[in-house]
C-alpha cells in the first residue's frame, strides 16, 4: 500500500506539466490573481497568505463561507476548475467552489451500517426517479422502498458532468456532486434520510474514463495514458506520474465514505482499468477501504462491475484475490432475459437453452471458461462454489445498462405479461445471489429508460448519437428507431410516472414484490450463501424450470401451455398472479406462471 501523502492546502494543485500556475479568486472574495510556487513533486501552492479568503471562510454564515476559484496554466488565459473540486455550482466549465464538509449537521450517529449479505439493492437514477429529479424529491419515496424490502439504494453516478441531464458516466470532476440534483448538501440530506429509514447507500463511481466535455485534467498532469477503452482514453494507473493519479482516485473513494457517509461503492467497468502495477488499483482500494471500515466501525462495501467473469476480483486477499466484496453477474440477467423473452440476438445467443439458467443458478457464471459466440473466444473462470458465498454476486432481471443500452430503452414490461414479470421477480429475489431491482420494475413501469445526454458542445452531442447507432449494429436493432440522446424528449420519456403504482397492474405487481420481500426476511433458505445447496432441473421441451434450496422449491413455467409436475411439496408460499394448483403432490402451473413452495 502506498504511503499517504502530506496534507495539502485548500488551494494546492498538482500540475507537473505547467511552467507557471496562477490561482484565480472569484468576485465573492474581491477577485484577484495569486502566483503559485512549485515543489519537487509537481504540487503548486499559493505564495500569498490569502487573508481575505481565510476571513471569508471563517465567516459564521455558511451561505457565504466559500471561495470561487480556478487556475490559469502557463500563458493560457482560460481559467480551469480544480481537478479535486468539491463543488461546481456553475457547471464543469466554470469556477470551482470550496466546501467545508464539517458544516453539515448529520443525524445518523446511531447508524451502524448494513452488510451486503442478505440485502436487496435498488438501482435508481436521481434525475429520472422523480419528476423533480432531486435528492430531496427522492427522500419522499423512501417509504415506498422500505415497503418492498429494499436494504440499499444504488445511485447511478452523481458527480459533475456537462449539461443538465446525463446518465452520469460522462463525469469529469469525480469529487463534485451535480448541482441539478441538489449538490453536495442535497446528497448529504438524502444519505442522512436513508439511514434514518434503515437503508444503506451505494454510490456508482466511474474511474475508468473521463467524459468528453470539460475534461481538463490532462492539462494539469498525466492523468491519461496511451490507449483507449470503449469510452475514451485510458486512465494512467501505472505510468509516469501515476502515483498522484491513483491517489486522487483513492482519496475520492475515502471521500464518499467519510464526508458523505456512503456505505458502498459500485465500481463501473473495472475491466477497463488497465493497471500493471505490483498492487492493482482494485486491491489497493480494498486495502484502504477495509482499514477505513475498521476505523469507522461500520461495513463498507466495494462492488465491481466486470465483464471478465473472473472470481479473482472477489476472492479474499488472504486467498490471493483482490478482496472486493462483490461483483455483478450479467450472465444471470442474460439467462433470465432469454428464458422469458426468447430473444437470442447478439450476446444472448449462448443463453437459449434453459440449461443456461440452471448452470448460472448453480455455478454463478454461465461462461466460466466456455466458448462465447459473441466474443468469438473462450471466456470466464469457474467459481469455487465450496469457498465463494453466493451473495458476492449481484444479479438482476433489469438494470440501467440492460434497458438503456437497448435501441429504444424498452423494459421487460413492454414484452411480458404480469405472470412473466412476477417470474422475473421470483427468480431474482428468491435465487441464491444478492438481488438488485431497477427503479420502477416493482410496479411494471411503462416508461422506458433511454440513453440521454445534454452536452453543450454540439459536435460531441452528434458524435455521441452516431456512436450509439454503431454500438447496436451487432444486436441487429434498427438504427432508425434509436432516439437522439441530445433530444430533451429522450430524457423526459425516461422519468418515472408515480401514478402507475396506483393502477390495477401496479398494485398487482407491488404485491408480488412485497410478498417476496417478506419471504426473504422469514425464510432462512432464501439467504443461504452456499451454492452447493442449489439444485436445478429443466425440461427443455415443456420449458419447465425448478430450483431447490434447502426446504424450498421454486418452479417456473416458461412455456405457453400449462404443465404439471409431481413434487414433494406441501405448502405454496408464493404464486404468480394467475395462481397455481397443488393437489396430492401434483403441481399445475399455468402458462408463464411460477411458484415458491415448501417441501
Image (spheres, grey):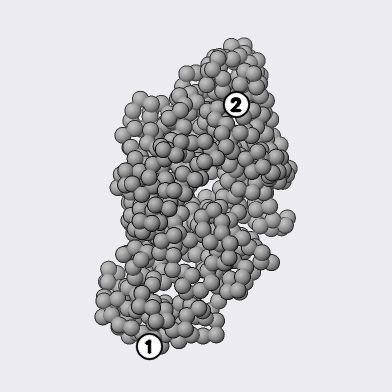
Secondary element under disc 1, as helix, strand or loop, is: loop
Does residue 589 lie above or below 424 as drawn? above
At 60% from the left and 48% from the top, the residue drawn is 307
**Spatial CA span between label 1 and label 2:** 70 Å
Q: Quadrant of the C terminus?
A: top right
Residue 500 picture quarter: top left
Q: Position of residue 8 (x, y in %)?
A: 48, 78
Is 310 left or right of 561, judged from the image as shown? right
At 70% from the left and 43% from the top, the residue drawn is 378
- The residue lying toward the viewer, choosing from 305 and 525, is 305
User: In the image, which disc is placed on residue 561?
Assistant: none
Q: Residues within 10 Å of mark 1 (few under 14, many from 20)?
A: few
Q: Position of residue 518 (x, y in %)?
A: 49, 33
First in sequence: mark 1 vs mark 2: 1
Q: Position of residue 524 (x, y in %)?
A: 60, 35
Q: Which residue is mark 2?
A: 554
Q: Position of residue 295 (x, y in %)?
A: 55, 64
Secondary element under disc 2, as helix, strand or loop, is: strand
Q: Quadrant of the N terminus?
A: bottom right
Is 174 left or right of 104, judged from the image as shown? right
Instruction: Answer yes or no: is residue 138 visible.
Output: no
Does residue 132 lie above or below 144 as drawn? below
- The residue lying toward the viewer, choosing from 362 and 484, is 484
- The residue lying toward the viewer, choosing from 528 and 247, is 247
At 44% from the left and 39% from the top, the residue drawn is 479
User: In the image, which disc is placed on residue 48?
Assistant: 1
Amino acid at each position: 500500500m502506498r504511503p499517504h501523502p502530506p496534507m495539502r492546502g485548500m488551494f494546492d494543485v498538482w500540475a507537473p506539466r505547467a511552467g507557471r500556475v496562477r490561482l484565480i479568486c472569484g468576485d465573492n472574495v474581491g477577485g484577484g490573481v495569486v502566483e503559485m510556487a512549485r515543489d519537487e513533486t509537481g504540487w503548486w501552492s499559493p505564495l500569498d497568505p490569502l487573508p481575505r479568503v481565510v476571513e471569508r471562510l471563517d465567516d459564521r454564515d455558511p451561505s457565504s463561507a466559500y471561495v470561487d476559484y480556478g487556475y490559469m496554466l502557463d500563458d493560457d488565459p482560460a481559467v480551469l476548475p480544480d481537478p479535486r473540486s468539491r463543488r461546481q455550482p456553475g457547471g464543469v466549465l466554470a469556477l470551482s467552489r470550496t466546501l467545508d464538509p464539517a458544516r453539515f449537521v448529520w443525524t445518523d450517529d446511531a447508524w451502524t451500517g448494513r452488510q451486503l449479505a442478505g440485502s436487496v439493492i435498488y438501482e435508481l437514477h436521481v434525475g429520472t426517479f422523480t419528476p423533480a429529479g432531486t435528492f430531496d424529491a427522492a427522500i419522499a419515496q423512501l417509504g415506498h422502498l422500505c415497503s418492498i424490502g429494499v436494504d440499499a439504494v444504488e445511485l447511478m453516478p452523481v458527480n459533475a458532468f456537462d449539461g443538465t441531464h446525463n446518465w452520469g458516466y460522462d463525469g469529469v470532476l469525480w469529487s463534485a456532486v451535480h448541482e441539478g440534483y441538489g449538490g453536495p448538501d442535497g446528497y448529504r440530506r438524502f444519505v442522512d434520510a436513508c439511514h434514518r429509514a434503515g437503508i444503506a447507500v451505494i454510490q456508482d463511481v466511474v474511474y475508468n474514463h473521463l467524459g468528453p466535455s470539460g475534461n481538463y485534467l490532462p492539462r494539469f498532469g498525466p492523468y491519461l495514458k496511451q490507449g483507449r477503452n470503449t469510452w475514451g482514453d485510458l486512465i494512467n494507473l501505472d505510468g509516469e506520474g501515476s502515483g498522484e493519479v491513483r491517489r486522487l482516485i483513492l482519496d475520492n473513494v475515502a471521500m464518499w465514505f467519510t464526508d458523505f457517509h456512503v456505505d458502498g461503492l459500485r465500481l463501473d467497468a473495472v475491466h477497463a482499468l488497465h493497471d500493471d502495477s505490483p498492487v492493482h488499483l482494485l486491491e489497493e482500494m480494498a486495502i484502504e477501504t477495509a482499514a477505513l471500515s475498521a476505523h469507522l466501525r461500520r461495513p463498507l462495501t466495494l462492488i465491481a462491475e466486470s465483464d471478465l467473469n473472473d472470481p479473482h476480483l472477489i476472492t479474499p486477499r488472504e486467498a490471493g484475490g483482490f478482496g472486493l466484496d462483490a461483483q455483478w453477474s450479467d450472465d444471470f440477467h442474460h439467462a433470465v432475459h432469454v428464458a422469458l423473452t426468447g430473444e437470442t440476438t447478439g450476446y444472448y445467443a449462448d443463453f437459449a437453452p434453459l440449461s443456461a439458467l440452471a448452470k448460472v443458478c448453480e455455478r454463478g457464471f454461465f461462461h466460466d471458461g466456455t466458448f462465447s459466440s459473441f466474443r468469438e473466444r473462450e471466456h470466464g473462470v469457474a467459481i469455487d462454489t465450496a469457498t465463494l458465498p453466493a451473495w458476492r454476486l449481484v444479479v438482476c432481471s433489469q438494470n440501467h445498462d440492460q434497458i438503456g443500452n437497448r435501441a429504444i430503452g424498452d423494459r421487460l414490461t413492454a414484452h411480458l405479461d404480469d405472470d412473466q414479470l412476477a417470474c422475473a421477480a421470483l427468480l431474482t429475489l428468491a435465487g441464491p445471489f444478492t438481488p438488485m431491482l431497477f427503479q420502477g420494475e416493482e410496479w411494471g413501469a411503462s416508461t422506458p429508460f433511454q440513453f440521454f445526454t445534454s452536452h453543450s458542445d454540439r459536435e460531441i452531442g452528434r458524435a455521441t448519437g452516431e456512436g450509439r447507432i454503431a454500438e447496436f449494429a451487432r444486436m441487429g436493432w434498427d438504427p432508425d428507431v434509436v432516439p437522439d440522446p441530445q433530444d430533451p424528449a429522450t430524457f423526459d420519456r425516461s422519468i418515472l410516472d408515480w401514478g402507475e403504482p396506483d393502477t390495477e397492474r401496479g398494485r398487482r405487481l407491488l404485491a408480488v414484490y412485497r410478498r417476496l420481500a417478506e419471504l426473504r426476511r422469514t425464510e432462512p433458505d432464501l439467504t443461504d450463501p452456499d451454492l452447493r445447496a442449489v439444485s436445478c432441473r429443466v425440461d427443455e421441451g415443456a420449458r419447465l424450470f425448478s430450483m431447490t434450496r434447502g426446504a424450498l422449491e421454486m418452479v417456473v413455467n416458461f412455456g405457453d401451455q400449462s404443465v404439471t409436475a409431481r413434487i414433494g411439496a406441501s405448502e405454496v408460499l408464493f404464486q404468480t398472479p394467475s395462481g397455481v394448483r397443488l393437489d396430492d403432490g401434483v403441481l399445475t402451473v399455468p402458462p408463464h406462471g411460477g411458484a415458491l413452495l415448501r417441501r
